[in-house]
Image: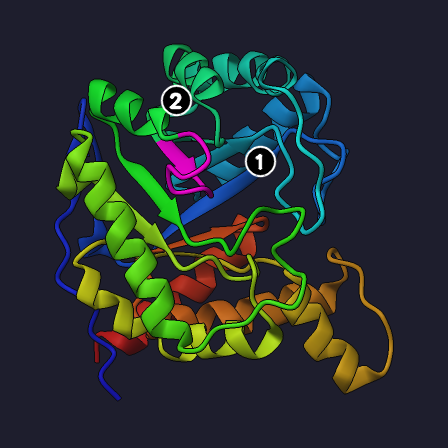
Amino acid sequence: MNTAKANVTNIEWDGRCLDFDKGALVMGILNVTPDSFSDGGDFFSPDAAVAQGEKLVEDGAAILDIGGESTRPFADDISGEEETRRVIPVLEKLAARVNVPISIDTTKTSVARRALDAGASIMNDVGAFRLDPDLADLAAARDVPVILMHMKGVPRTMQVDPHYDDLLAEIKGFLAERIEFAVSRGVDRDKIIVDPGIGFGKTVAHNLELIRRLREFDELDAPVLVGLSRKAFIRNLLKDRYGKEFHPQDPEVETGTQAALSATIMNGAHIVRVHDVANTIPTVAICEALRKL
């Protein structure tokens, strides 16, 4: 099996660097929400969120990803004002306390602009500039890295009988088109990261196929981010095995997450987005050692 990663360019901007030569980077998830599928409400207070953000960095996160709106299946939209109210106080404090890049996970230009002003330096858009095309103009003006993710539909509808005629071709085609759109609006091609969107409008079988064939995204000539931490497909696979329901924070789900992460790293993921950074760091270390043999 060929385990070499695609030869992507390290991303450098404003004195920062995402160095992929060192192996897969770990992005820590910080949900400042009451309703995220795994940790909704756990870090909804600013003090709890700041403490968790600091812990994720202490545990080894190379990037901190802050979001104020849940994108779980069937989630309702919130206003830009509410999303801003949730994330900005947390982001301002963390930007002064941690030394890693902070990503703002949002689909709204108004929120992203405030976040960049407050210290964020990466934009993570699950809508890939479809839901708010002006985000591309903001990314170009600020010259920051962007993460463009594939999602079938929107969170409210994405898990309603998702169907593909050719899973990999359709997702790669979507991401290639969104890269082209971003570049047409002035985004630096070398600052684009792609995310195949595990769990966003995909069945269990779709997610497993994406992990197994992740290397095919190398054709896009962009770093590949994978976010699968604690997701429903892992819990469903465990339910089939054990015959019972699992909560996202159950230890078996974390073990399943690490197993899936191992496959993605061995198959070339450049960034893995996770809830539990401390558990993921040794997984990355072992996978990278094996990959380099």
Left or right: residue 75 compared with residue 286: right
In the displayed structure, 97 sits above or below 104; it is above
What span is colored magenta in the figure?
123-132
Q: Position of residue 274 (x, y in %)?
A: 53, 51
Tell me the quarter of the image containing the C terminus: bottom left
Q: Which residue is mark 2?
A: 120
Q: Position of residue 160 (x, y in %)?
A: 67, 62
What's the magenta bit mostly, secondary-structure-wise? loop
What kind of element bears circle 1? Answer: strand
Q: Is residue 127 magenta?
A: yes
Name the image quarter holding residue 172: bottom left
Q: Earlier in the sequence, mark 2 or mark 1?
A: 1
Dot 1 crowding, Cα within 10 Å, few <14, some 14–19, many 20+: many
Q: Nearer the viewer, residue 59 or 170?
A: 170
Q: Residue at x 40, y 60 (%)?
A: 196
Disc 2: CA contacts within 10 A as few (<14), some (14-19) or many (>=20): many
72 left or right, relative to 267: right
Q: Name the quadrant containing residue 286.
A: bottom left
Percent across and percent down for residue 288 are 31, 68
Q: What secondary structure is found at the residue carrying circle 2?
A: loop
Query: Label 1: which residue?
Result: 30
Label 2 with label 1: CB-CB less than 8 Å: no
The quarter of the rendered structure image containing the N terminus is bottom left
Amino acid type, residue under disc 1 in the picture:
Leu
3D distance between C-alphas at marks 2 and 1: 13 Å
Q: Please report the residue visible at 57 percent of the width from the left and 15 percent of the height from the top.
A: 84
